[in-house]
Image (cartoon, coloured by chain):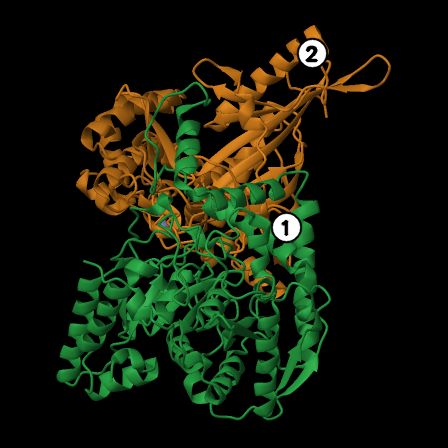
Chain colours: A orange, B green
Amino acid sequence: MNASTSETQVPFTTIIGLEVHVQLQTLTKLFCGCSTAFGAPPNTQVCPVCLGLPGSLPVMNQRAFRLALKAALALDCNIASFTKWDRKNYFYPDLPKGYQISQFDLPFSTDGTLEVIDPKGTIGPCRVGIVRVHLEEDAGKSMHDETAGSGDTRIDLNRAGTPLCEIVTQPDLRSPQEARLWLNELKLLLVYLGVSDCNMQEGSLRVDANVNLHIPQPDGRIAKTPIVEIKNMNSFRSVERALVYETTRQWGVWQETHAEMGKTPKQTRGWDDPAGVTRAQRHKEESSDYRYFPEPDLVPVTVSSAQQAAVRSEMGEPPVRVRKGLETRWKISAYDADVLVNQGRQLVDYFEELATLIGDGKIASNWLQQDVLRTLNERGGTIEDFPVRPAALAELIARVNAGDFDTSRAREIFSEMLASGRSAADAVLSMGIAVIGDDELVALCRDILAANPKIVADVKGGKEQAAAGLIGHAKKKNPNINPGKVRTICIDLIRAMQ
Amino acid sequence: MQPADLSAIDLVAAVRQGDLSAVQCTEAFLNRIQYCNGAINAFLNVDRAGALACAESIDVRRRSGQPLGPLAGLPVAVKDALCTADLPTTAASKMLENFRPPYDAFVVSRLRQADAVIVGKTNMDEFAMGGSNENSAFGPVHNPWDFSRAPGGSSGGSAACVAADMTPVAIGSDTGGSIRQPAGLCGITGLKPTYGRVSRRGLIAFASSLDQIGPMARSAADCALVLETIAGHDPGDSTSLTDAVPRYTSLLEQPLAGVRVGRVPEHFAAGLDPEVAKGVEEAFAVLKAAGATVHDIAMPHAKYGVATYYLVAPCEASSNLARYDGAHYGHRASAKPSSAFESPLIEMYCRSRAEGFGPEVKRRIMLGTYALSSGYYDAYYAKALKVRRLIRQDYLDAFEHVDLIGGPVSATPAFKLGEKTGDPLAMYLVDLYTVSTNLAGVGGISFPCGFTKSGLPIGFQLQAPALGEPLLLRASDRFQRLTDWHLRRPPNLTALCTPKG
Ligand SMILES: [Zn+2]
């Protein structure tokens, strides 16, 4: 449980808890029929309900509730048989009703866990408790219009009412690296389940972190530094950096002041990514009294065990099981399984199709990691749109295995397949690669041997490396020959002469 | 015969049969409004052109033999708390003075689909908060029986409108008595249906768990006609009930023999005006004569009704009214930069709300905000919810023994305008007999059961278990077949009203 992976042991334990907000992948908002699509012109995906017009009433989106239920079940949470909605009251221009519909004292799920094992083994396994998962509506966006010079604020309510799952962890994480690793796994899980696209650039996944230090004292007591909540981190890398910064900052403050938790109020600090520092936010925002009370416009939701079972049955495998499955079915390493699984369910499906066709997981994994993923990284795009489908790639690999061409030639053919979308056979044809039959190749070798008695004599004399000269001659006669094959045939023929 | 002398049921029949055109009918009532409204101030907005166009289209369709809706040609006034796509909707607040909703309330679209003619929007207490209609930002409504008196509230405009024959029926909303109390003080019939029976979608919310829309008319039979149209499940209101809607007008014939009516002795304690007490006792006698039996029952938690109501309702209101912040719609104060506010945003909120809301609305927002605040929630709101459950249980227990509960609607007949405005607590007590119905979520109806010596109407209230509207309407209708109090009209009204223009 110790603090960090750095060489020098630090004299404290870092305590981190996370609060993750995930936008659910629904077509429509949580309490109205407006689209949740990202990127539409401001205020075009709104209606009286999400604008908070007088007299408008919310109606719960059943699909959003099912998705949230799926996430909670995958996080091993207990599902409440009865859950209700509450209003969280505060004034802000991006909150048109003056309250957010959320869940306060009876969230639909509590007490879960998500365990993460680092396949690279640099960080020990971490098992993180989930305090609660609840469903709420997102607010709109305020944009401060700096260009106008007037300090005007513009409001876009397209996002207002988008379903949001809030996942609150126990303070079980012990280092910034662990936090990042765990977030990666959470994201992967939610994407595998189809609960969220977890796109941080579009704000589909947002993270706040609570962090403080536990410092053993000479008298055996553990001193705890005041908890700081860090906001405004827009990538997992920022989360890690902000936590590293904050840990160091708190250690510095501790050494100066010895200020402990409880003696100062909980502080909220914003992460300034370019500057690489956290900054204290205004006190006003911390001391809000949200005056929660049960939402009278909605009825409580009951969840039967049959409903839970139905959601479970359509859940699919979580990444942790997919990794294990790949390792045992295809005899690939934990590391390789992790690389493939981290690329998403579609890549895993591609891999399994390919491995099945060629009957070899290791070769399939190598091709995927070396060629397919490299190409995807260069060209962008997703595996679903990748022009070379598993069947085509399997055909190519089979021909390599059959000795039709060597790997470097195969890569050229692969590039042609990519560019043209052709099958391996068609690519070979279009590249003018006439595959030489075995009889033809033997005849060709006989001709070369006849034309190069000097080399034949050298080989006969025991200088097998002289055979390299024969390959050059063979390539001149036909550029499509497989050099390895030519060499073997020639040596066999020379031996047969003796 | 003048259209104003016909019941809503007869008017609809006359239009259907072609004895009266929808335009003639609408014009007659519009003229009455033009004549009377200046003195009564029941309307905030009259849509003469829209109403006549609607009536005209009904006549065209009737002449060409096309089917007509069940309320074809019936002029209806709608409380200004219900959204109307083509008319301003203000909730009688300066905050929404220039607000035009982009949509019709569920009830309004049901009325339009039934070919009712919406003639205008009626005055009310601001955001339905009040029991006298004096909290309107656009002036009080005058009781047609005595212009110096309040019509009750908050649906005072709708009640006065029907009492003065400006429309045969009107739509009100009732959060703690806002249909039944003004109906009682104005001598008409008003029904607050079971919570969830009528969709709240498009009703500007005061207290969501208590608000309910209902019909106001001269008779129970006319209320039944309107309720048939506006009741029913709305998938757009999660609290709306899915139970099938009976044909209320066809369920009025069965006699009252064997119906057990409860009487709460505490209702007749000190504070109840003797003339009202007498009228109410006589109403019990009429019900007995009709075959019902009367039984004293206990409602042990009724005395906590007003206290409970004035926690639950303001708490919900403080949240429901948070949206009126000047940011998106409604009144926004002009910026007057001042160092008194910590930011221009806070200044906009404070000034807009200070200017847009009247004193009673502010009072209730403050009450609710305080009661929901951390440290007070358990002592106030949570405790109020517990008492609310006890009150609901009182009703369940009582309805084990009786089918209806009868009693007064309010302790006094219509009081003088200005009489209670200086004393908010006295004003809150006008809801004494009506709030528990809303807290329990059951239905209630009020209708006239007599007049004071000075000629003011006395109201009688009946309450029924959830979805007991058929019995409420049947008992009231039976009462009205045996009496003629509901047929009386304010004397000299025509002479007292000065025509406008
Ligand atoms: Zn919407």
Q: Disc 1 or 2, which lies upstream in sequence?
A: 1
Quadrant for residue B120, please give it: bottom left
Label 1 secondary element: loop
Assess mark 2: CB under 8 A from ligand 1?
no
Query: Residue at image x 22%, y 89%?
Result: B17
Label ID, residue B56: none
For the N terminus of chain B, which image quadrant?
A: bottom left
Which residue is under mark 1? A106
Which residue is under mark 2? A254
Residue nearer the viewer, A385 or B456: B456
Q: Is residue A164 visible?
A: no
Q: Residue A182: where, in percent of width, then height? A: 58, 33
Residue nearer the viewer, A370 or A387: A387
For the C terminus of chain B, which image quadrant?
A: bottom left
Q: Residue A274: where, in percent of width, then height? A: 43, 15
Residue nearer the viewer, B119 or A33: B119
Tell which subunit mark 2 falls on. A
